[in-house]
């Protein structure tokens, strides 16, 4: 029987550009116009809380993991560490303090890098889709900038490459509205010695409905899509982590 691994779950803050978040949470407001920050701050708050809840729930089902809770007296220190961007590396001193105060063997760090919009990594030259289901996206259209041109013109399998262009941009718009992609990065970090043992990223999609590109999507439906896409991203991340656990020692 393998020895259980005590982990502390840490979620990095969302650092997505406000303009991109406005496209998700206030799509009817033109980017050039200033809006109240409340819709965005509330949307980000819910995104973080939902992702953390789903992640912790999924991890508790892994029999080899024991999720630890930091003591109250270390709350300020832990909150400071959690405020780090996902790309920020902890120091060995910080890792030692976490281990001493919580008893954790390792950290499971994760963060949302794209929320409700096509991941930026898909937009660089040729885009390799990180999803496993068949996607219907607009890939070839005569782009004029009008709403009428933002229509689905072709179905592509996930993993197929699409060249970034004006036509592909409209396809990304259709993908955003039809399935609200949510991308999550995660890593498993051993505290002593400080080592990143495993790292992955996955993009979840909501149920795909092409009718969303030709009608207005209300707030409730959009929020349901975002939660569903988050659920799928977390599920894929934890599934990958579960496979990796077979070869990870405490």
Image (cartoon, rainbow, N blue to C red):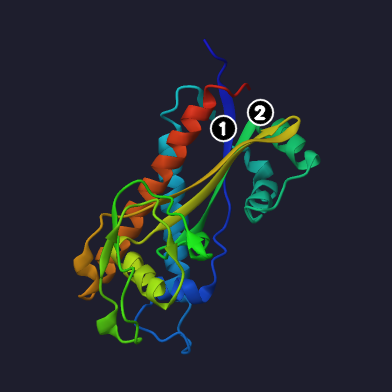
Q: Position of residue 127 (x, y in %)?
A: 47, 59
Which residue of the protein is positioned furthest toward the right in this rendering? Answer: 93
Left or right of 129, for residue 154: left
- Res. 101 image quadrant: top right
Determine the secondary structure under disc 2.
loop
Residue annotated with mark 1: 68
Please name whichever residue, 214 or 123, is drawn nearer the observer in this view of the structure: 123
Which residue of the protein is positioned furthest toward the top in this rendering? Answer: 1
Please name whichever residue, 241 or 147, is drawn nearer the observer in this view of the structure: 147
What mark, if any, has residue 225 been given in the picture? Answer: none
142, above or below 191, in the image: below
Residue annotated with mark 2: 103
Say if mark 2 contacts mark 1, CB within 8 Å.
yes
Q: Tell me if I can see residue 120 in this picture.
A: yes
Q: Position of residue 160 (x, y in %)?
A: 39, 54
The residue drawn where x is 40% and y is 71% is 168
Q: Position of residue 88 (x, y in %)?
A: 70, 52
Q: Residues within 10 Å of mark 2 (few under 14, many from 20)?
A: some
Please name whichever residue, 153 or 108, is drawn nearer the observer in this view of the structure: 153
Left or right of 120, for residue 24: left
């Amino acid at each position: 029987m393998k020895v259980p691994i005590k982990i502390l779950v840490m979620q990095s803050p969302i650092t997505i550009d406000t303009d991109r978040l406005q496209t998700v949470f206030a799509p009817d407001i033109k980017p050039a116009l200033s809006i109240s920050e409340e819709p965005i701050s509330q949307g980000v708050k819910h995104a973080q809380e939902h992702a953390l809840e789903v992640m912790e729930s999924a991890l508790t089902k892994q029999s080899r993991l024991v999720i630890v809770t930091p003591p109250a007296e270390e709350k300020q220190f832990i909150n400071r560490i959690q405020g780090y961007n996902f790309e920020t590396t902890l120091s060995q001193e910080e890792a030692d303090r976490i281990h001493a105060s919580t008893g954790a063997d390792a950290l499971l760090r994760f963060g949302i890098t794209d929320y409700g919009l096509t991941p930026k990594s898909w937009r660089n030259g040729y885009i390799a889709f990180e999803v496993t289901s068949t996607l219907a996206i607009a890939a070839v259209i005569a782009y004029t900038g009008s709403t009428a041109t933002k229509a689905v013109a072709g179905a592509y399998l996930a993993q197929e490459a699409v060249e970034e262009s004006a036509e592909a941009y409209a396809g990304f718009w259709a993908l955003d509205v039809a399935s609200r992609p949510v991308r999550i990065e995660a890593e498993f970090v051993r505290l002593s010695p400080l080592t990143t043992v495993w790292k992955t990223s996955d993009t979840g999609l909501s149920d795909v409905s092409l009718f969303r590109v030709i009608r207005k999507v209300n707030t409730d439906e959009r929020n349901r899509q975002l939660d569903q896409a988050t659920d799928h991203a977390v599920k894929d991340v934890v599934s990958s982590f579960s496979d990796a656990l077979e070869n990870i020692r405490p």
